[in-house]
Image (spheres, rainbow, N blue to C red):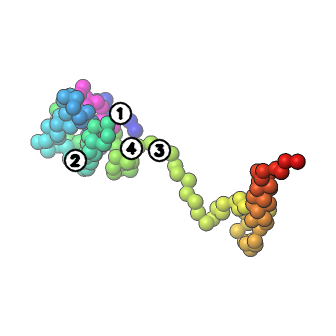
Amino acid sequence: MTLQRDNPLPVGRYWVSVIGPVPGSGAKDKRKVAEEWFSDRPQVQIITVESHEHVFDDPAWDWYLFEVQSRPLPDWPSAELGFVNRAGPEIKSSQDTVSRPDVPQLSDSVPLPDVVNPTATLDPNRPKTAGGGGLIWALLAWAAYEYFQPKARS
């Protein structure tokens, strides 16, 4: 993601997150500044607007995906709203602009090891057999029971 620092904005596709005030702070609502800038601008097409409500301590915020189709254009209010980001064709929602780690997916093609049967293999073609894992747990339970039994005093 690349910030667009030129002002007025060149022809192109952009996205921006505009954060509202923290409830009760009395600060100016920057979302109103963005709405005013976008209103009555035939050379700017808003592609998508997402409004996210106030949650716990996080203020409400709006996410805009828009395209500047021609110039001249009034300056973007970067002093109040910050710089916009260039948006490629892959950007379609605010989720496309968030960095997050890949979540590994479990599938049948990669079987998990059998933790009960220590002799199990990862060979998916090997037939499943009853392992000795249950016997090991039974022996451990019996040993713990014997260990914690009160000893007879002589």
Q: Please report whichever mark, 1 or 4, sits nearer to the chain's N-terminal start.
A: 1
Q: Please report whichever mark, 2 or 3, sits nearer to the chain's N-terminal start.
A: 2
Instruction: Give me the C-alpha separation between circle 3 and circle 1.
Output: 20 Å
Dividing the picture into quarters, in which one does residue 70 lie?
top left
Q: Is residue 115 left or right of residue 62?
A: right
Instruction: Give me the C-alpha separation between circle 2 and circle 3.
Output: 26 Å
Disc 4: which residue: 97
Local packing at callout 4 (Cα closer than 10 Å; few below 14, some 14-19, many 20+) is some
**Which type of secondary structure does the marked residue at label 1 adopt?**
strand
Disc 3: which residue: 100
Query: What amino acid is at disc 2?
Result: Ile
**Quadrant housing the N terminus:** top left
**Which type of secondary structure does the marked residue at label 2 adopt?**
strand
Look at the image and give the residue range highlighted in magenta. 78-85
Query: What amino acid is at disc 1?
Result: Leu
User: What residue do we see at 61% from left, 66% from top?
Assistant: 108
For marks 2 and 4, give the one nearer the viewer: 4
Query: What amino acid is at disc 3?
Result: Arg
For marks 4 and 3, give the one nearer the viewer: 3
Query: What amino acid is at disc 4?
Result: Thr
Dividing the picture into quarters, in which one does residue 66 lie?
top left
User: What residue do we see at 78% from left, 50% from top?
Assistant: 150
Disc 1: which residue: 3
Instruction: Give me the C-alpha separation between circle 1 and circle 4.
Output: 12 Å
Instruction: Give me the C-alpha separation between circle 2 and circle 1.
Output: 18 Å
Does the magenta run of residues contain 119? no
